[in-house]
């Protein structure tokens, strides 16, 4: 293993230890667990997307995506935890365990990353988006990122409100006139609520 491989492995381990937390508590006793994605989650991710409303898919992907293309699905489940980070929120309902939230970052430079997240329609407005973004900020910081940004459609008021709550600055997106860019330095992330460790939640459990 090269020196670079050793560094990546150490960083990935740090990320995994950071993202296994719940902060802040959801306003619901059936609290999903947030964990790094696994290769075995491929089918559950496709199911998650299929359950999203057309509007939720549009707000996340800027187009009415019907299913995850194979290249994107592979990219998600094979995230290395350093250059790319993918977190899922897993909850139990009458049908068993399912993914109810997806958050991800992609490293653009040594110290900057782009992020995106989406929450299942039946879990929106219950604090899960905040938990996912908190976890994403913490894991990105653990991987050595110092600045996070993302492009959000202007009509996605809930995401813009959440970003502002967590200290993101909002400006016009240079890529799309229908979007705004949110960004912030990670060394000033608000730390509300205590972090506590929790075990991985396996979809097969």
Image (cartoon, rainbow, N blue to C red):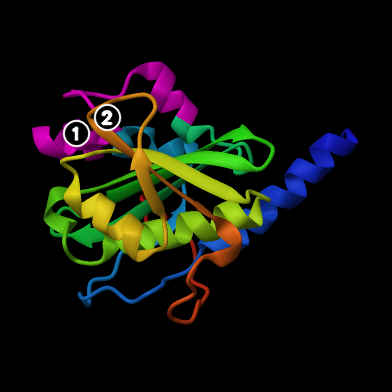
Residue 177 in the image: above or below residue 110? above
Q: Position of residue 161 (x, y in %)?
A: 25, 58
SS at mark 1 in the image: helix
138 in the magenta segment: no
Q: Position of residue 54 (x, y in %)?
A: 10, 32
Q: 37 or 11: nearer the eye?
A: 11
Q: 72 or 165: nearer the eye?
A: 165
64 in the magenta segment: yes
Measuring 17% from the left and 60% from the top, which residue is drawn there? 93
| Residue numbers of the magenta segment | 46-75
- Number of labels in the image equals 2
Measuring 25% from the left and 66% from the top, which residue is drawn there? 127
Q: Is residue 42 left or right of residue 83?
A: left
Q: Spot the residue most to the bottom.
A: 194
Q: Which mark is residue 61?
A: 2
Which residue is the site of mark 1?
Answer: 57
Q: Which mark is residue 139?
A: none
Q: Is residue 172 visible?
A: yes
Task: Please report contact status of discs 1 and 2: CB closer than 8 Å, yes or no.
Answer: yes
Number of other residues with Cα within 10 Å of mark 2, as a class: few under 14, some 14 to 19, many 20 or more: some
């Amino acid at each position: 293993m090269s020196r670079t491989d050793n560094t990546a492995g150490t960083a990935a381990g740090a990320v995994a230890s950071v993202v296994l937390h719940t902060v802040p508590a959801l306003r619901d006793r059936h609290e999903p667990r947030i964990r790094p994605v696994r290769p075995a989650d491929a089918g559950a991710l496709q199911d998650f997307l299929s359950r999203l409303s057309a509007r939720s898919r549009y707000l996340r992907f800027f187009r009415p995506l019907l299913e995850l293309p194979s290249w994107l699905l592979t990219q998600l489940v094979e995230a290395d935890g350093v250059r790319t980070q993918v977190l899922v929120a897993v909850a139990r309902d009458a049908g068993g365990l399912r993914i109810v939230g997806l958050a991800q970052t992609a490293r653009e430079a040594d110290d900057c990353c782009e992020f995106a997240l989406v929450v299942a329609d039946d879990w929106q407005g219950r604090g899960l988006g905040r938990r996912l973004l908190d976890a994403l900020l913490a894991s990105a910081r653990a991987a050595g990122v110092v600045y996070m940004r993302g492009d959000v459609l202007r009509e996605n008021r809930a995401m813009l409100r959440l970003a502002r709550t967590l200290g993101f600055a909002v400006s016009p997106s240079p890529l799309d006139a229908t979007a705004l860019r949110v960004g912030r330095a990670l060394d000033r992330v608000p730390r509300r609520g205590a972090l506590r460790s929790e075990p991985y939640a396996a979809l097969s459990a």
